[in-house]
Each structure stands twice: as structure tokens, then as C-alpha cells.
Image (cartoon, rainbow, N blue to C red):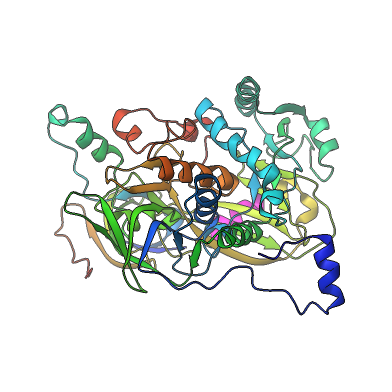
Amino acid sequence: MLLIPCPYCGDRPEIEFSYGGQAHIARPPVPAALDDEQWGSFLYGRDNVRGPHRERWRHSHGCARFFNILRDTRTDLILASYRVGDPLPETGAS
Amino acid sequence: MQRYSLFSLIRHGLRNHSGWREQWRAAAPKSQYDAIIIGGGGHGLGAAFYLARDYGLTNIAVLEKGWIGGGNTGRNTTIIRSNYLFDESSSLYDHAVKKWEALSGELNYNVMYSRRGVMMLAHTVHDEQVFRRHIHANRLNGVDNEWLTAEQAKAYCPPLNIDPGMRYPIIGAALQRRGGTARHDAVAWGYARAADAMGVDIIENCEVTGIDRHRSGRVIGVQTSRGPIQAAKVGVSAAGNSSVVMGMAGLRLPLESFPLQALVSEPVKPVLPCVVMSNTIHAYISQSDKGELVIGAGTDVYTSYTQRGGLHIAQHTLEAICEIFPQFRRMRMLRNWGGIVDVTPDRSPIIAKTSVPGLYVNCGWGTGGFKATPGAAHLLAHTMATDAPHALNAPFTIERFRDGYMIDEAAAAAVAH
């Protein structure tokens, strides 16, 4: 079980959280302007990174807030935790 | 290839078993092949076998970064069934079930396919309605599936606890009698041996690090940890690492990779005659021929490539197992492991040509790829050899996520499957 550092509450066990998938996928401001390829890619395409991965979590059974973490998917080591709107931490990816 | 038979067993037995040869060559990569398969699991090795046997392509290689069958082929819970809801799915999975039935003979290798029946338990009125709908849909598609009352389920599987006082009482079950299990390692070995006998090079410890493309865009070969290899056709069958490999060709797929855990108990005498599954309380269990109870847990919630997951996921499944089979409560679990499964948004696979000429993909099998091994392998081979999909895999494109033609087994099963 992961020990997840909530930027508001500190380290808490994974079962208090829900996973929100890849972070920083911005909804297009004018969806109707997209063609099918772009819209399909927005909805379903994912980087599925093998390495440092920026992802959303929600502290559902705690403060209930969304935040982001940077986790290496090769080791599950959490490299950084940051609030929505904070500057992006370096991924360290080569 | 040394053919295996009762007579060869006796002959070699009389010679103190000193005459057995290795089952496939330890091939070194050549500089050029007609086609390359990336991924030496059951699906990839099988594709090489069908390319060689059915489509006449023998100058081909299977590239495996580790050892063959060491990925998800050796990590699954070996369940075989085809009782899927939608027409496209039941046709696809039943294609595989039909191939399972003949596989040992075709490969001259005992894959220990055991048609012991797969029983899916219903615990709620909603479960019963969903299963009855599946049963009707399956039977219209020529796939066997039948409804059992709780008492009939217990008659088929005597250790089952049908006490109405349990927290999630068993009110009935759907039974696919043609479902069952097979020995997963033997599937990889059998395909490897039979493909090797037709001239296919099976190259282990050979990691693909890049996909080379011509100026026009088409595939011309791959870069590997054992040097560059040219090929006009490349098939990717890399399971949890499909996104990584396809990324080498500049393609971004609708896939996410999750750890999926399984575990086995200490071996005991035969106690469980069939496969028992419960989607509602999430438990999958069967008994191997060695006597171990083979138990499948769920996926972890987060994407990962670690081949391990959280203990609470396995614990959740064991709690469900102990509810259905209270007599297993005191058994010890011997091993617990994880595999990385690539999951699509609709939980159906992709077997298709890609937008890159000469590049083909077989991925997205999620938590249920083992059962499809012979079917998926055959369809990938067909798609690569003819440069066009077979009617059975034509709906399973990448473009369905652009065009909205989902095959939504995720909604149909309410869980990953």
C-alpha cells in the first residue's frame, strides 16, 4: 500500500484516496472546434508513462481535495506532491 | 523436432532419458527477417506459429526482452471462457475456445486444457438479471451458458457455501461448461517448440529499444539490445508494455497499465472441481493439477509497471474466498505476485493494423488475455500476413475510440474481466 503525501494533510495510507489518472490533461476550451481525432485523443489517449508520472489523486476520506503527485511507475516511489495550480516539479526523466 | 508420444516416452525411458533434446534453439538474431513479433508470451509465440504454419512465413523472429512466458503468460490464473455479452466479444473469445480444444494435438504438446466448467456466482437480483441476459445473448451466439439455482451450483461444486445467512448469499450461478483452465507455461513452451521446428527464431534476452521507419513512414526494422534487425512487418504483442513499445513508433494508444495480482495456496488434495468466479464480491479461484488453489485478485487503482501491488488488494479477495469457501480459511498462501495488464477504456482488446504501414498491434487484453491466447495469436498472424483484419478482429481497432464504436464489456461485466 502506498503512503501518499497529501499536500494538505501529510502522509496517509492509500486506502484514504481515490486515483484520478494522468494529470494536466486540460479540457479543450472549445470542444466543438476539435476534429474526431483530437477529441478521441483527449478522451481516451494516455501517455501511460513508464517512469516519472504526473497523476491526480483525491483525498476522498480526508480533506476531499484534489492534488497531484509525481510517482515513478517503475518503482512506485513518490517523488513529489503538489497542489493544483502549483508549478510543476521536474520529472527527472532523461 | 522430436515428436512426443507414449512410444517416445518408453523409448527414451529405456535409454535412461538421456536422449531428450532442447525444445527450441537458442537462436541469435539475424540481420533481416520478413516479419518480427515483439513479445515472447503466448500471444506472440502463437502468432509466430500461425504465421509459419497457416500463412507460410517462416523467416520470422520473436523478440523477448526476458525469457519466454515470463510475463503475463506465466502470471495469470489460467481461466478460459467465452461467455461475454456482446456479439463481437463472444465471437472473438469463442474463436479462442475452439482453438483451445484442438491445441494440444496441433502442437504435439500437452497444454493440459481442462474443460472443467466456469461458474460465475450471482449474489443479488441484479446479478441474476445480468447473468440471465448474458446467458440468452451467449446462446443466441452459439456459446454455451446456463443458469443454475444455488442448489444446482452446489451439486456441481460441492465445497460451495450456499448458506442463505451469509452476507452476500449465493442465489444462483451462470455455468459455461466448455470453460476451464490450461497450463499456462506449457502454452508458451508448446508454441515456441512448434514454431521453432518450422524455422522461427525465438530470441530471448533481446529488448527492443527502437522502431525504425522509412522516410515514407513505413516500418523497416527495430533496434534491440542485441543490435539492429531489419523487417518490413513488425507485430507488437507486449501486454503491459504496449504503450512503451508503440511510443517508439510515435503512437499514443488508449491504454493504461495496472498491476494485477494473483496468489496460490499450499497444495492440497483435489477439492475444487471447477473454476468459480464472483464479480460482485470479487474472487476468482480454481485448483491446479499440482493441488494449489489459484486465486486471482483485482487490479491496483494506480498505473504501474512494478509487477507487484498492494497487500490490501489480495486481502480483499481472500476475504471473499473465505466467505464462499469457509473451509479454506486455515489454508496458507504460498506465493503472491503481480503482472502488468494494459487496459483499454472499454475493456476490450485491440488487434489491428496501425496508422504506421507495416506495424501491427495486439494489446489491451487487460485482465483477461490468457483465455484468448490461441485466438488472438491466430488473428494477429492473419492481420500481419494479409495486411487486413480477419472478420473476427475487424471491430477491435484503435480507431473505435475515435469513432465511438466501443465494445463496452466494462459496462457489461461491471468489473474488469
Please tell me which residue lies in front, B67 or B285: B67
Q: Quadrant of the C terminus of chain B?
A: top right
Q: Quadrant of residue B116?
A: top right
Q: Is residue B76 visible?
A: yes
Give the answer, above or below, for where B355 lies relative to B238.
above
Give the answer, above or below, for where B327 lies relative to B310.
above
**Overall secondary structure of the magenta stretch?**
helix
Give the answer, above or below, for where A7 lies relative to B121.
below
Q: Position of residue B361 (x, y in %)?
A: 39, 47
Please tell me which residue lies in front, A60 or B41: B41
Q: Position of residue B112 (x, y in %)?
A: 73, 53
Q: Position of residue B206 (x, y in %)?
A: 42, 70
Q: Is residue A89 left or right of residue B57?
A: left
Q: Quadrant of residue B270?
A: bottom right
Residue drawn at x 63%, y 56% is B187
Residue drawn at x 84%, y 42% is B158
Q: Is residue B165 left or right of residue B401?
A: right
Please tell me which residue lies in front, A67 or B64: B64
Q: Which residues are magenta?
A: B311-320
Q: Quadrant of residue B125?
A: top right
Residue drawn at x 21%, y 70% is A94
User: Residue B317 lies in magenta, yes or no?
Assistant: yes
Q: Quadrant of the N terminus of chain B?
A: bottom right
Q: Is residue B335 left or right of residue A44?
A: right
Give the answer, above or below, for where A80 lies relative to A86.
below
